Amino acid sequence: MRIAVTGSIATDHLTVFPGRFKDQLIPDRLDQISLSFLADTLEVRRGGVAANIAVGLARLGLAPVLVGAVGHDFGEYAAWLGANGVDTGAVRLSRTLHTARFMCTTDADHNQIATFYAGAMAEARHISLAAVAERSGRPDLVVIAPNDPEAMLRHTEECRRLGLEFAADPSQQLARLDREQTRHLVAGARFLFTNAYEAALLLERTGWTREEVLDRVGTWVCTLGADGAELLARDRPARRVAALPTAGAVDPTGVGDAFRSGLLAAVARRLPLGTAALLGCALATLVLETVGTQEYKVVPSELLRRIGQAYGPDAAGALEPLLAELP
Protein backbone atom coordinates (compact mmCIF):
# COMPACT_ATOMS: atom_id res chain seq x y z
CA MET A 1 0.00 0.00 0.00
CA ARG A 2 1.47 3.36 -1.06
CA ILE A 3 0.71 6.26 1.29
CA ALA A 4 1.35 9.90 0.42
CA VAL A 5 1.59 12.17 3.46
CA THR A 6 0.88 15.84 2.88
CA GLY A 7 1.38 18.51 5.51
CA SER A 8 3.93 20.46 7.47
CA ILE A 9 7.67 19.81 7.41
CA ALA A 10 9.41 21.77 10.13
CA THR A 11 12.25 22.09 12.59
CA ASP A 12 11.21 21.78 16.25
CA HIS A 13 12.77 23.97 18.93
CA LEU A 14 11.73 22.28 22.17
CA THR A 15 12.30 23.81 25.61
CA VAL A 16 11.35 22.58 29.09
CA PHE A 17 10.11 24.87 31.87
CA PRO A 18 10.47 23.12 35.28
CA GLY A 19 7.50 24.95 36.79
CA ARG A 20 3.81 25.02 35.93
CA PHE A 21 2.22 27.50 33.55
CA LYS A 22 -0.90 27.76 35.70
CA ASP A 23 1.14 29.07 38.63
CA GLN A 24 2.20 32.07 36.54
CA LEU A 25 -1.32 33.15 35.57
CA ILE A 26 -3.16 35.81 37.56
CA PRO A 27 -6.91 35.24 37.15
CA ASP A 28 -7.93 38.91 36.98
CA ARG A 29 -5.08 39.81 34.57
CA LEU A 30 -5.76 37.34 31.78
CA ASP A 31 -6.61 40.17 29.38
CA GLN A 32 -2.99 41.38 29.55
CA ILE A 33 -0.56 38.46 29.53
CA SER A 34 3.17 39.06 29.25
CA LEU A 35 5.11 36.03 30.43
CA SER A 36 8.66 34.77 30.07
CA PHE A 37 9.71 31.26 31.08
CA LEU A 38 13.30 30.39 31.95
CA ALA A 39 13.84 27.01 30.30
CA ASP A 40 16.29 24.43 31.58
CA THR A 41 16.91 22.69 28.24
CA LEU A 42 16.75 23.31 24.51
CA GLU A 43 16.46 20.57 21.91
CA VAL A 44 16.50 21.36 18.20
CA ARG A 45 14.87 18.47 16.36
CA ARG A 46 13.45 17.52 13.00
CA GLY A 47 9.67 17.70 12.92
CA GLY A 48 6.51 18.77 11.17
CA VAL A 49 3.36 16.67 11.25
CA ALA A 50 3.72 15.20 7.75
CA ALA A 51 7.40 14.42 8.22
CA ASN A 52 6.73 12.83 11.61
CA ILE A 53 3.99 10.60 10.19
CA ALA A 54 6.14 9.66 7.20
CA VAL A 55 9.10 8.71 9.40
CA GLY A 56 6.83 6.54 11.55
CA LEU A 57 5.49 4.75 8.48
CA ALA A 58 9.04 4.16 7.23
CA ARG A 59 10.11 2.82 10.63
CA LEU A 60 7.32 0.28 10.29
CA GLY A 61 8.45 -0.92 6.89
CA LEU A 62 6.50 1.25 4.45
CA ALA A 63 7.91 3.59 1.80
CA PRO A 64 5.84 6.78 2.26
CA VAL A 65 5.89 9.71 -0.14
CA LEU A 66 6.29 13.02 1.70
CA VAL A 67 4.46 15.98 0.13
CA GLY A 68 5.05 19.52 1.39
CA ALA A 69 7.01 22.73 0.92
CA VAL A 70 10.36 23.60 2.51
CA GLY A 71 13.06 26.27 2.39
CA HIS A 72 16.60 26.38 1.07
CA ASP A 73 17.82 25.18 4.49
CA PHE A 74 16.27 21.72 3.98
CA GLY A 75 19.29 19.88 2.53
CA GLU A 76 20.52 18.09 5.65
CA TYR A 77 16.98 17.22 6.75
CA ALA A 78 16.17 15.85 3.27
CA ALA A 79 19.25 13.63 3.33
CA TRP A 80 18.32 12.29 6.76
CA LEU A 81 14.73 11.54 5.68
CA GLY A 82 15.96 9.73 2.59
CA ALA A 83 18.36 7.65 4.65
CA ASN A 84 15.42 6.70 6.88
CA GLY A 85 13.20 5.43 4.08
CA VAL A 86 11.09 8.51 3.27
CA ASP A 87 10.65 9.52 -0.38
CA THR A 88 11.19 13.33 -0.54
CA GLY A 89 11.04 13.67 -4.31
CA ALA A 90 7.62 15.36 -4.14
CA VAL A 91 8.76 18.06 -1.69
CA ARG A 92 8.67 21.60 -3.12
CA LEU A 93 11.72 23.79 -2.47
CA SER A 94 11.10 27.52 -1.91
CA ARG A 95 13.67 29.92 -3.29
CA THR A 96 12.96 32.66 -0.74
CA LEU A 97 11.52 31.29 2.50
CA HIS A 98 12.88 29.23 5.39
CA THR A 99 11.55 25.83 6.34
CA ALA A 100 8.78 26.12 8.93
CA ARG A 101 9.65 26.32 12.64
CA PHE A 102 7.76 24.88 15.61
CA MET A 103 8.78 26.54 18.89
CA CYS A 104 7.35 24.83 21.97
CA THR A 105 7.76 25.06 25.75
CA THR A 106 6.54 22.19 27.94
CA ASP A 107 5.91 22.58 31.67
CA ALA A 108 6.13 20.10 34.55
CA ASP A 109 2.55 18.91 33.93
CA HIS A 110 3.27 18.34 30.20
CA ASN A 111 1.17 21.35 29.23
CA GLN A 112 2.55 23.15 26.18
CA ILE A 113 2.71 26.69 24.81
CA ALA A 114 3.81 26.79 21.19
CA THR A 115 4.28 29.07 18.20
CA PHE A 116 4.43 27.86 14.63
CA TYR A 117 6.11 29.89 11.88
CA ALA A 118 4.81 28.71 8.53
CA GLY A 119 7.59 30.00 6.26
CA ALA A 120 7.87 27.93 3.09
CA MET A 121 4.81 25.90 4.06
CA ALA A 122 2.70 28.64 2.44
CA GLU A 123 3.92 27.42 -0.95
CA ALA A 124 2.40 23.95 -0.47
CA ARG A 125 -0.75 25.25 -2.14
CA HIS A 126 1.14 25.10 -5.45
CA ILE A 127 1.73 21.33 -5.21
CA SER A 128 -0.34 19.14 -7.50
CA LEU A 129 -1.24 15.64 -6.31
CA ALA A 130 -1.76 14.64 -9.92
CA ALA A 131 1.89 15.47 -10.57
CA VAL A 132 2.91 13.56 -7.43
CA ALA A 133 0.96 10.50 -8.62
CA GLU A 134 2.58 10.73 -12.05
CA ARG A 135 6.05 10.88 -10.51
CA SER A 136 5.70 8.41 -7.62
CA GLY A 137 2.78 6.22 -8.61
CA ARG A 138 -0.87 6.49 -7.70
CA PRO A 139 -1.21 6.50 -3.89
CA ASP A 140 -3.68 4.17 -2.22
CA LEU A 141 -4.22 6.74 0.55
CA VAL A 142 -3.42 10.43 0.91
CA VAL A 143 -3.02 11.81 4.43
CA ILE A 144 -4.04 15.46 4.54
CA ALA A 145 -2.32 16.63 7.70
CA PRO A 146 -2.04 20.22 9.05
CA ASN A 147 -0.55 22.43 6.35
CA ASP A 148 -1.15 25.70 4.58
CA PRO A 149 -4.99 25.84 4.65
CA GLU A 150 -5.22 26.49 0.92
CA ALA A 151 -3.02 23.45 0.32
CA MET A 152 -5.25 21.28 2.50
CA LEU A 153 -8.33 22.39 0.58
CA ARG A 154 -6.65 21.85 -2.78
CA HIS A 155 -5.33 18.40 -1.84
CA THR A 156 -8.77 17.34 -0.59
CA GLU A 157 -10.46 18.51 -3.78
CA GLU A 158 -7.82 16.76 -5.90
CA CYS A 159 -8.38 13.50 -4.01
CA ARG A 160 -12.07 13.66 -4.82
CA ARG A 161 -11.43 14.55 -8.47
CA LEU A 162 -8.79 11.82 -8.91
CA GLY A 163 -10.73 9.20 -6.96
CA LEU A 164 -8.06 8.89 -4.24
CA GLU A 165 -8.96 7.79 -0.74
CA PHE A 166 -7.86 10.29 1.89
CA ALA A 167 -7.45 10.68 5.63
CA ALA A 168 -8.51 14.06 7.04
CA ASP A 169 -6.30 15.33 9.86
CA PRO A 170 -7.10 19.06 10.24
CA SER A 171 -6.08 19.21 13.95
CA GLN A 172 -4.14 22.44 14.66
CA GLN A 173 -5.54 24.21 11.61
CA LEU A 174 -9.15 23.94 12.79
CA ALA A 175 -8.72 27.33 14.45
CA ARG A 176 -8.00 28.86 11.02
CA LEU A 177 -10.86 27.22 9.12
CA ASP A 178 -14.42 28.43 8.65
CA ARG A 179 -17.52 26.23 8.46
CA GLU A 180 -17.49 25.50 4.75
CA GLN A 181 -13.74 24.85 4.69
CA THR A 182 -13.96 22.42 7.60
CA ARG A 183 -16.86 20.58 6.03
CA HIS A 184 -14.94 20.41 2.75
CA LEU A 185 -11.93 18.80 4.45
CA VAL A 186 -13.98 16.19 6.32
CA ALA A 187 -16.68 14.98 3.95
CA GLY A 188 -15.77 11.75 2.20
CA ALA A 189 -12.67 10.95 4.27
CA ARG A 190 -11.85 7.30 4.80
CA PHE A 191 -10.36 8.30 8.16
CA LEU A 192 -10.88 11.41 10.27
CA PHE A 193 -8.24 12.04 12.95
CA THR A 194 -8.71 14.38 15.93
CA ASN A 195 -7.88 14.51 19.60
CA ALA A 196 -10.64 15.05 22.17
CA TYR A 197 -10.41 18.85 22.17
CA GLU A 198 -10.27 18.98 18.38
CA ALA A 199 -13.32 16.71 18.20
CA ALA A 200 -15.38 19.31 20.09
CA LEU A 201 -13.92 22.12 17.97
CA LEU A 202 -14.68 20.19 14.77
CA LEU A 203 -18.32 19.85 15.77
CA GLU A 204 -18.48 23.58 16.50
CA ARG A 205 -16.78 24.48 13.22
CA THR A 206 -18.89 22.20 11.00
CA GLY A 207 -22.17 22.76 12.82
CA TRP A 208 -22.74 19.02 12.52
CA THR A 209 -23.65 16.58 15.27
CA ARG A 210 -21.39 13.62 15.91
CA GLU A 211 -23.83 11.42 14.02
CA GLU A 212 -23.78 13.78 11.05
CA VAL A 213 -19.98 13.64 10.96
CA LEU A 214 -20.10 9.85 11.06
CA ASP A 215 -22.55 9.90 8.12
CA ARG A 216 -19.79 11.57 6.08
CA VAL A 217 -16.63 9.66 7.03
CA GLY A 218 -15.52 6.05 7.16
CA THR A 219 -13.97 5.98 10.63
CA TRP A 220 -13.45 8.80 13.10
CA VAL A 221 -10.33 8.13 15.18
CA CYS A 222 -10.14 10.27 18.30
CA THR A 223 -7.00 10.16 20.44
CA LEU A 224 -7.48 10.60 24.19
CA GLY A 225 -3.97 11.09 25.55
CA ALA A 226 -3.29 8.81 28.51
CA ASP A 227 -6.71 7.21 27.97
CA GLY A 228 -5.75 5.82 24.56
CA ALA A 229 -8.04 6.28 21.57
CA GLU A 230 -11.63 5.83 20.48
CA LEU A 231 -12.79 4.42 17.13
CA LEU A 232 -16.13 5.69 15.89
CA ALA A 233 -18.08 4.59 12.83
CA ARG A 234 -21.68 4.84 11.67
CA ASP A 235 -23.95 2.03 12.84
CA ARG A 236 -21.18 0.46 14.96
CA PRO A 237 -20.63 0.84 18.71
CA ALA A 238 -17.70 3.01 19.73
CA ARG A 239 -14.55 1.08 20.58
CA ARG A 240 -12.04 2.29 23.15
CA VAL A 241 -8.38 1.23 22.91
CA ALA A 242 -6.17 1.72 25.96
CA ALA A 243 -2.82 3.49 25.79
CA LEU A 244 0.33 1.39 26.12
CA PRO A 245 1.46 1.98 29.73
CA THR A 246 4.63 3.92 30.41
CA ALA A 247 6.60 4.70 33.52
CA GLY A 248 8.85 7.21 31.78
CA ALA A 249 6.93 9.97 30.00
CA VAL A 250 9.46 12.50 28.70
CA ASP A 251 7.96 14.65 25.94
CA PRO A 252 4.43 14.59 24.44
CA THR A 253 5.41 16.36 21.21
CA GLY A 254 4.59 14.22 18.18
CA VAL A 255 2.74 11.50 20.11
CA GLY A 256 -0.39 11.92 17.99
CA ASP A 257 1.64 11.78 14.79
CA ALA A 258 3.20 8.48 15.86
CA PHE A 259 -0.25 7.08 16.65
CA ARG A 260 -1.34 7.87 13.12
CA SER A 261 1.78 6.17 11.72
CA GLY A 262 1.21 3.00 13.69
CA LEU A 263 -2.47 2.75 12.85
CA LEU A 264 -1.96 3.44 9.14
CA ALA A 265 0.99 1.06 8.87
CA ALA A 266 -1.19 -1.74 10.23
CA VAL A 267 -4.10 -0.74 7.97
CA ALA A 268 -1.69 -0.94 5.03
CA ARG A 269 -1.04 -4.57 6.01
CA ARG A 270 -4.82 -5.18 6.06
CA LEU A 271 -5.01 -5.72 9.80
CA PRO A 272 -8.33 -5.02 11.59
CA LEU A 273 -8.77 -1.43 12.70
CA GLY A 274 -8.84 -2.34 16.38
CA THR A 275 -5.50 -4.14 16.06
CA ALA A 276 -4.14 -1.22 14.02
CA ALA A 277 -5.06 1.17 16.84
CA LEU A 278 -3.05 -0.95 19.28
CA LEU A 279 0.05 -0.48 17.16
CA GLY A 280 -0.76 3.22 17.01
CA CYS A 281 -0.89 3.41 20.80
CA ALA A 282 2.35 1.44 21.09
CA LEU A 283 4.25 3.72 18.73
CA ALA A 284 2.80 6.77 20.48
CA THR A 285 4.23 5.58 23.78
CA LEU A 286 7.68 5.15 22.22
CA VAL A 287 7.58 8.81 21.18
CA LEU A 288 6.28 9.86 24.60
CA GLU A 289 9.37 8.24 26.13
CA THR A 290 11.76 10.14 23.82
CA VAL A 291 12.77 13.78 23.44
CA GLY A 292 11.95 14.80 19.87
CA THR A 293 9.40 13.47 17.43
CA GLN A 294 11.59 11.26 15.22
CA GLU A 295 14.39 10.07 17.51
CA TYR A 296 12.65 6.96 18.87
CA LYS A 297 13.76 3.46 17.92
CA VAL A 298 11.52 0.53 17.05
CA VAL A 299 12.98 -2.69 18.45
CA PRO A 300 10.51 -5.34 17.23
CA SER A 301 11.08 -7.92 19.96
CA GLU A 302 10.83 -5.36 22.74
CA LEU A 303 7.76 -3.70 21.26
CA LEU A 304 6.04 -7.07 20.85
CA ARG A 305 6.83 -7.90 24.48
CA ARG A 306 5.22 -4.67 25.66
CA ILE A 307 2.20 -5.14 23.41
CA GLY A 308 1.73 -8.65 24.76
CA GLN A 309 1.94 -7.44 28.36
CA ALA A 310 -0.52 -4.61 27.78
CA TYR A 311 -3.02 -6.12 25.36
CA GLY A 312 -2.52 -9.87 25.61
CA PRO A 313 -0.98 -12.63 23.46
CA ASP A 314 -3.63 -12.43 20.73
CA ALA A 315 -2.77 -8.79 20.01
CA ALA A 316 0.94 -9.56 19.99
CA GLY A 317 0.35 -12.52 17.70
CA ALA A 318 -1.66 -10.40 15.26
CA LEU A 319 1.10 -7.78 15.04
CA GLU A 320 4.05 -10.17 15.07
CA PRO A 321 4.15 -10.75 11.28
CA LEU A 322 4.30 -7.00 10.64
CA LEU A 323 7.01 -6.33 13.22
CA ALA A 324 8.97 -9.46 12.32
CA GLU A 325 9.63 -7.97 8.87
CA LEU A 326 11.47 -4.98 10.36
CA PRO A 327 15.26 -4.95 10.63
Image: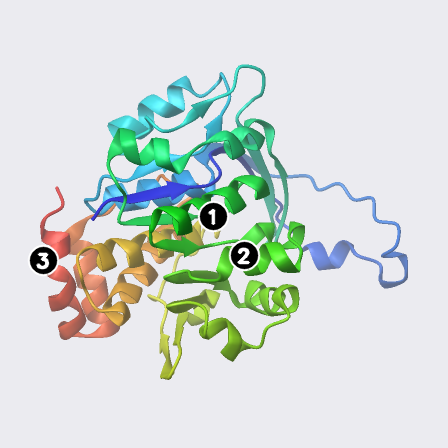
Residue 71, given in percent of the width and then of the height, sits at 51, 21
| Residue 296 shows in the view | no
Instruction: Identify residue for label 1.
Output: 157
Judge the density around disc 2: few (<14), some (14-19), many (≥20) Cα neighbours within 10 Å. Answer: some
Q: Quadrant of residue 319?
A: bottom left
Specify the amino acid type for callout 1.
Glu
Specify the amino acid type for callout 2.
His
Residue at image point 22% right, 65% down:
307
Residue at image point 33% right, 28% down:
88
Q: Are circles 3 and 1 on residues that touch, CB within 8 Å?
A: no
Residue 7 versus residue 142: which sits nearer the camera?
A: 142
Q: Secondary structure at mark 1?
A: helix
Residue at image point 57% right, 63% down:
198
Residue 61, given in percent of the width and then of the height, sits at 19, 44
Q: Secondary structure at mark 2?
A: helix
Residue 275, given in percent of the width and then of the height, sits at 23, 68
Residue 109 versus residue 102: which sits nearer the camera?
A: 102
Q: Are circles 1 and 2 on residues that touch, CB within 8 Å?
A: yes
Instruction: Identify residue for label 3.
Output: 321
Judge the density around disc 3: few (<14), some (14-19), many (≥20) Cα neighbours within 10 Å. Answer: few
Answer with mark 3 or mark 1, whichever residue precedes in sequence: 1
Instruction: Identify residue for label 2.
Output: 184
Q: Secondary structure at mark 3?
A: helix
